[in-house]
Image: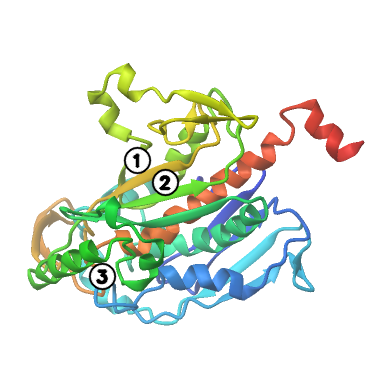
C-alpha cells in the first residue's frame, strides 16, 4: 500500500489497523533538542480516544502511547521518533456479518476492488483509529511550533444545523463540553439534537475549525506546494472529510472584489491587513494574519438502521450494522484536524529556512 507517508522534511508514516495488535507512527525530520515525553503526546491522544462521553463509541481504549526511539534524557535526538499504541478492546466478532458485504458510505467496496482483499474488522486502514498515528505526530509538531510562537486553536464549529455564534466564543469553553464547542449555548442545543439522532439510530454531520496564530510571513511555496493547497490535502486525507474551506471559503463565490480584498496598512514598521477574508494566506504563502481553516465531516456511515447493499458476489442484500460507533465524527476529529495542520505547517516552516541566502548565513556564518 502506497500513501501512508506525509510531508517532505518533517515527515510522518502511520501504520496499523483498527483491530490489529497496535497502531503507530514514525516521525522523521524532527529537530533535536526538543523537550519531549510520553505525556506531551498523551494529552493529544486523550482528546481523540473513544468512550469519553455519551456521544462517542463505547470502545474502551486507554490509547496509551509508548516512545520507542528518537528521545534520550527527555529530549529529541534528531533521529526517527517511533511511537506505538496497542489495541486492547477489539470486538472483531461484531463485524462478522459484514465480512462478505459492503457497508453503505464506507470504503469497503472500493478497498476490495483495489486490493482484492480487505480487513473487514472495523475497516482496517480505513478506520478512524488510523488517526492515532497522525495525532501522536501532531502533538510533536505542535510542541515544536509552540517554541516558534505558533499556536493552534481547534473546535467543533457546527453539528447539523447548530452553528456556533462567534459573539459567544470562549476558548475556555472548548474543553468544558464533550462536543468541544466554544459556544456553551450552541453546545447545549447540539447535545439535544444528538440525543434525538441517537434515539433514531442515526448519525449526523459536523464541521471543525482551526485558527492558527503566529505564523511568520512567507510560509508556503507559490506553485504546487501552496500552504493552502497542502493544508487542504492534509485535511482531506482525514476519513469522512468532504470539504475544506480557508478564510471565507465558499462565500467568496458570492462576493465582489471590493468586498473580498483585504486592504493592507502599515504602522510601527509592520504591514497588516484591515480584514482577513483570505484566511491568512495569499498566493499560497502566509501573510502573517491568523490562518483560518474549516473541515466539513459527513455523518458517520455506520448507523443502526437496516440498509440496502450488495455482497462480494454482487448480489443484493440488506444489512444491519453492529458494533460500537460514534453518532458524530466532528468532536473526536477536532484534534485530528489540529494535528494535520500542525504537521503541514511545521514541514513548510522548516523548508522555508532555505528560501533566502540571509537565512542560511544566520545559521552557518
Q: Are marks 2 and 3 in contact (CB under 8 Å)?
A: no
Q: Residue at x 67, y 43 (%)?
A: 9
- What percent of the width, then of the height, locates residue 249? 32, 34
Q: Can residue 6 be seen in this view?
A: no
Q: Earlier in the sequence, mark 1 or mark 3?
A: 1
Give the label, 1 or 3, closer to the camera. Answer: 1
- Label 1 vs label 2: CA separation? 7 Å
The residue lying toward the viewer, choosing from 314 and 151, is 151
Q: Is residue 325 left or right of residue 292?
A: left
Mark 1 = which residue? 244
The residue lying toward the viewer, choosing from 274 and 150, is 274
Mark 3 = which residue? 325
- Label 2 vs label 3: CA separation? 22 Å
Q: Are marks 1 and 2 in contact (CB under 8 Å)?
A: yes
In the figure, residue 335 lies in which quadrant?
A: bottom left
Q: What element carries label 2?
A: helix
Amino acid at each position: 500500500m502506497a500513501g501512508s507517508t506525509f510531508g517532505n522534511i518533517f515527515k510522518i508514516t502511520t501504520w496499523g489497523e483498527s483491530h490489529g495488535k497496535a497502531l503507530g507512527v514514525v516521525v522523521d525530520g524532527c529537530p533535536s533538542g526538543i523537550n519531549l515525553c510520553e505525556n506531551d503526546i498523551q494529552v493529544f491522544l486523550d482528546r481523540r480516544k473513544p468512550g469519553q462521553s455519551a456521544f462517542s463509541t463505547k470502545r474502551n481504549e486507554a490509547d496509551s502511547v509508548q516512545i520507542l526511539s528518537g528521545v534520550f534524557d527527555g529530549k529529541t535526538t534528531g533521529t526517527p521518533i517511533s511511537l506505538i499504541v496497542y489495541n486492547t478492546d477489539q470486538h472483531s466478532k461484531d463485524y462478522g456479518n459484514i465480512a462478505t458485504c459492503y457497508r453503505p458510505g464506507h470504503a469497503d467496496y472500493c478497498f476490495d476492488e483495489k486490493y482484492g482483499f480487505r480487513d473487514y474488522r472495523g475497516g482496517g486502514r480505513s478506520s478512524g483509529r488510523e488517526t492515532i498515528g497522525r495525532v501522536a505526530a501532531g502533538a510533536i509538531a505542535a510542541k515544536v511550533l509552540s517554541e516558534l510562537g505558533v499556536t493552534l486553536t481547534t473546535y467543533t464549529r457546527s453539528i447539523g444545523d447548530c452553528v456556533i455564534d462567534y459573539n459567544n466564543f470562549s476558548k475556555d469553553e472548548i474543553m468544558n463540553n464533550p462536543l468541544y464547542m466554544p459556544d456553551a449555548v450552541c453546545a447545549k442545543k447540539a447535545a439535544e439534537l444528538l440525543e434525538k439522532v441517537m434515539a433514531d439510530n442515526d448519525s449526523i454531520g459536523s464541521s471543525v475549525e482551526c485558527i492558527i496564530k503566529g505564523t511568520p510571513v512567507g510560509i508556503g511555496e507559490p506553485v504546487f506546494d501552496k500552504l493552502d493547497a497542502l493544508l487542504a490535502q492534509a485535511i482531506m486525507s482525514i476519513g469522512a472529510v468532504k470539504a475544506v474551506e480557508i478564510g471565507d471559503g465558499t462565500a467568496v463565490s458570492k462576493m465582489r472584489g471590493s468586498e473580498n480584498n483585504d486592504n493592507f496598512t502599515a504602522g510601527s514598521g509592520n504591514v497588516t491587513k484591515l480584514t482577513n477574508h483570505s484566511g491568512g494566506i495569499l498566493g499560497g504563502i502566509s501573510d502573517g494574519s491568523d490562518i483560518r481553516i474549516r473541515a466539513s465531516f459527513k455523518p458517520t456511515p455506520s448507523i443502526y438502521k437496516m440498509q440496502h447493499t450488495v455482497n462480494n458476489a454482487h448480489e443484493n442484500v440488506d444489512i444491519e450494522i453492529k458494533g460500537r460507533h460514534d453518532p458524530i465524527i466532528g468532536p473526536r476529529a477536532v484534534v485530528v484536524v489540529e494535528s494535520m495542520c500542525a504537521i503541514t505547517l511545521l514541514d513548510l516552516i522548516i523548508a522555508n529556512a532555505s528560501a533566502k541566502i540571509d537565512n542560511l548565513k544566520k545559521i552557518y556564518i
